[in-house]
Image: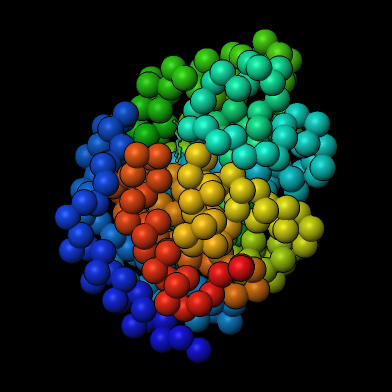
């Protein structure tokens, strides 16, 4: 068994001295104001053993990492019918790309780009009684932690700067692929992006995808097949136009967010979260990608 704490400590030491930490997202003040020097990692093994280094207990904006959780909730509610409204192919494009959606008649390439996530938000709106509260409860239950919250100020900033997301939602609506009003769907989407968690909370939340759909309390939240499908989508689509690079360098299903978080997992072995707010040119955490590459290289633990 590798010495996990020593490996995390060494990665932390190497990466935090790197001069180029990427660039913090600047489209909203709440993200622009985050210090680029933060760095945290948290690992949870299947047997419950946990390891952490750096700022792993500090809250950050999970942003697009929430897309996997929204997809999971939607899958638990409507199952395979999701795929009547979107595809499961990598887009090879940035997260908020628009033109492909028009060419492909309002059918998003996958649920982890914005267009797909907006359709998922629409599905949740149609099937949940109190969509925002129920979604938060779903996440709190996965983590066994009821302190997890939306950040209202982030949700508001997303709304007033979200012109591209409005364009995507309107395009989806024009093709008949949104059932609810654009405003309501985007309000939900902006709130899901605003959720804040620490690395250690995220690692706990994502345990169910490393555990055949069963959460920390060993209760089924998805079927084994559904968990397998979501992991496949994370591997092929979790990093937008850098999904190939992540599979090549890291070799794990994972998902990034513009807040600088990355969650990755090895089914039946572990879930791991990294947080470093500086992003690379493709909008994924620069040091987070490097940290996970070093982690899977040093532990020799990946799906390949
Ligand atoms: O849709 C947006 O612009 C953001 N709220 C989410 C972006 C995001 O995290 C993309 N990912 N890496």
User: Quick check: which quadrant has ligand 1?
Assistant: top left
Q: Is residue 25 above or below residue 136?
A: above
Rendered position, 169 above or below 212: above
Reply above or below: 112 against 148: above
Q: List x then y, in percent, for residue 153.
A: 35, 33
- Give the residue at x 63% y 16%: 102
Q: Residue at x 72, y 58 (%)?
A: 228
Q: Who is closer to the viewer here, 246 or 255?
A: 246
Q: Position of residue 94 (x, y in %)?
A: 48, 32
Query: Is residue 194 in view?
Result: yes
Left or right placement of residue 203 versus residue 121 in this view:
left
Residue 136 in view of the camera: no
Q: Residue furthest bottom?
A: 1
Model colouring: rainbow
Q: How many marks?
A: 0
Quadrant assignment, res 274: bottom left
Quadrant holding the C terminus: bottom right
Residue at 71% across, 13% down: 175
Image-based side of 266 in relation to 55, left or right: right
The residue that appears at 40% across and 39% down in the rendered structure is 282
Q: Nearer the viewer, residue 17 or 272?
A: 17
Q: Position of residue 133 (x, y in %)?
A: 58, 41
Q: Where is residue 266? Give x, y as percent.
A: 59, 68
């Amino acid at each position: 068994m590798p010495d996990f704490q020593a490996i995390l400590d060494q990665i932390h030491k190497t990466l935090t001295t790197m001069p180029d930490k990427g660039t913090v997202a600047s489209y909203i003040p709440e993200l622009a104001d985050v210090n680029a020097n933060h760095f945290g990692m948290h690992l949870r093994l299947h047997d419950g053993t946990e390891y952490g280094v750096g700022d792993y207990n500090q809250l950050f904006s999970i942003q697009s990492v929430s897309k996997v959780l929204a997809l999971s909730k939607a899958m638990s509610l409507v199952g395979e019918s999701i795929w009547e409204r979107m595809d499961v192919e990598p887009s090879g494009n940035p997260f908020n790309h628009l033109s492909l959606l028009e060419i492909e008649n309002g059918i998003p390439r996958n649920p982890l780009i914005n267009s797909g996530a907006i359709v998922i938000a629409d599905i949740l709106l149609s099937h949940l009684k109190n969509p925002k509260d129920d979604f938060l409860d779903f996440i709190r239950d996965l983590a066994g932690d009821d302190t997890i919250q939306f950040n209202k100020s982030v949700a508001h900033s997303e709304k007033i700067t979200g012109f591209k997301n409005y364009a995507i939602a309107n395009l989806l609506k024009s093709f008949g692929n949104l059932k609810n009003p654009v405003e309501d769907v985007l309000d939900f989407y902006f709130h899901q992006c605003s959720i804040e968690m620490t690395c250690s909370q995220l690692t706990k939340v994502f345990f169910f995808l490393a555990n055949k759909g069963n959460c920390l309390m060993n209760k089924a939240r998805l079927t084994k097949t559904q968990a397998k499908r979501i992991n496949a989508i994370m591997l092929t689509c979790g990093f937008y136009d850098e999904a190939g690079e992540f599979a090549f360098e890291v070799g794990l299903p994972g998902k990034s967010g513009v807040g600088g978080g990355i969650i990755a997992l090895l089914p039946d072995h572990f879930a791991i979260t990294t947080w470093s707010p500086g992003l690379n040119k493709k909008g994924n955490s620069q040091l987070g990608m490097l940290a996970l590459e070093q982690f899977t290289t040093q532990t020799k633990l990946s799906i390949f």
